[in-house]
């Protein structure tokens, strides 16, 4: 099914879009609050915040389940590191939800004559990898607050860990050799400040002429040199990552008291203006119901992150579930993996569906 593409934001020369996929014609419209209004899922793409757009790593399995259930599926752009920082990305995330809740219905009616509407009070948020951290930020700052979160192998559950802060001296990224810094010279501060904050790559079909963009491996490169959080916050001089290394704990199971003490210690160490960019510091009892799904063989975003965030939500009295997928690497839900892990994906979607569609509508 072809989406309706709508520009939700213009920033200087950068236009940001959402793709809006209507409910399947076979979907039961009785799920709607009114005959025209449908619940929606806003999805944010993967790419370590450094690569991609609303069409890359598209989750066909989630889109199909949502639209077949009468739920509108919305996939969103956001600006990229660098030259954007987490501050700009956060503003994009908030603006997506503002547009969906206040302007999307009228835009759909005017531009495409769509015979459906969005119910702004029944919107969930989902994301894969970095898209999950986008979802966490939406949970904190978007209005209306999402009704539920689906985090697929989510980055952002605990970015104050060796994976982000400690320089690597041996292969760590899916067994690949260490990256040559010379290939990323334009993406290293201060040269990175002039890089356009967009940049997708064709991930399917024939390869494009010329060498691949360094953006393809920019996220793991920043992990390799241990300065990812410098680019996320924009704090390079002095390096925020270097400051935080003395606070890096080992990854692993932590008690509720350990999580609380560590959160407080990190909050004190961060500049006030940067604290808003780290969802793990702000989990409260108001956190939306969340489903975490993560493979225990993930070498890119460690399972520790989902376990840590799951623990924080539970510590604060929130509703959360976690599914650990044995032997699964990062991106296990793509391509053939979606069929292999059908039961897991069914369970994850059903968690979100129940938060959007009441039992009397089902």
Image (cartoon, rainbow, N blue to C red):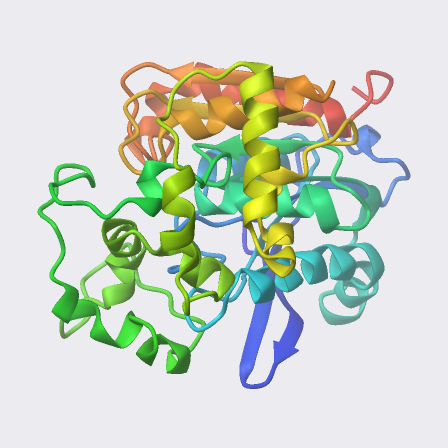
In percent of width and height, residue 124 lies at 69, 38
- Determine the residue positioned at 77% across, 26% down: 285
Residue 135 appears in the figure:
no
Camera-side residue of 185 and 265: 265
Q: Quadrant of residue 190?
A: bottom left
Camera-side residue of 86 and 143: 86
- Determine the residue positioned at 30% across, 29% down: 298
Instruction: Say if 2 sits above or below 172 in the image.
Output: below
Q: Is residue 268 left or right of residue 207?
A: right
Residue 354 appears in the figure:
yes
- Determine the residue positioned at 68% across, 33% down: 283
Q: Residue furthest bottom?
A: 13
Instruction: Say if 7 sits above or below 258 in the image.
Output: below
Instruction: Say if 36 sits above or below 102 in the image.
Output: above
In percent of width and height, residue 66 lies at 61, 34
In percent of width and height, residue 114 lies at 75, 58
């Amino acid at each position: 099914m072809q989406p309706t593409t709508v520009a939700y934001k213009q920033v200087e020369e950068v236009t940001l879009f959402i793709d809006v996929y209507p409910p399947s014609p076979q979907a039961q419209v009785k799920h709607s609050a009114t005959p025209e209004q449908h619940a929606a899922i806003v999805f944010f793409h993967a790419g370590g915040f450094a690569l991609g757009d609303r069409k890359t790593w598209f989750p066909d399995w989630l889109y199909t389940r949502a639209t077949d259930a009468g739920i509108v599926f919305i996939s969103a752009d956001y600006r990229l590191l660098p030259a954007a920082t987490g501050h700009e990305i956060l503003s994009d995330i908030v603006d997506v939800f503002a547009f969906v809740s206040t302007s999307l219905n009228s835009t759909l009616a005017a531009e495409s004559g769509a015979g459906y509407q969005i119910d702004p009070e029944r919107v969930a948020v989902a994301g894969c990898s970095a898209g999950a951290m986008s979802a966490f930020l939406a949970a904190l700052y978007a209005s209306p607050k999402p009704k539920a979160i689906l985090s697929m192998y989510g980055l952002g559950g605990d970015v104050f860990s060796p994976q982000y802060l400690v320089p690597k001296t041996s292969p760590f990224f899916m067994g690949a050799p260490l990256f040559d810094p010379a290939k990323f010279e334009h993406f290293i501060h201060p040269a990175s400040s002039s890089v356009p904050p967009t940049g997708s790559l064709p991930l399917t079909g024939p390869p494009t002429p010329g060498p691949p963009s360094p953006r393809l491996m920019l996220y793991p490169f920043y992990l390799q040199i241990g300065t990812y959080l410098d680019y996320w916050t924009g704090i390079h001089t002095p390096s925020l990552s270097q400051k935080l290394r003395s606070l890096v704990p080992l990854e692993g199971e932590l008690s509720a008291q350990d999580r609380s003490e560590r959160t407080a210690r990190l909050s004190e160490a961060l500049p006030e203006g940067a604290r808003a960019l780290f969802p793990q510091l702000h989990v409260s009892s108001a956190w939306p119901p969340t489903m975490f799904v993560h493979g225990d063989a993930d070498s890119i975003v460690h399972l520790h992150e989902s376990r840590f965030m799951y623990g924080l939500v539970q510590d604060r009295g929130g509703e959360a579930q976690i599914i650990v997928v044995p032997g699964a690497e990062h991106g296990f839900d793509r391509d053939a993996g979606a069929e292999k892990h059908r039961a897991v994906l069914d369970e994850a979607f059903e968690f979100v569906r129940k938060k959007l569609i009441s039992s009397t509508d089902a």
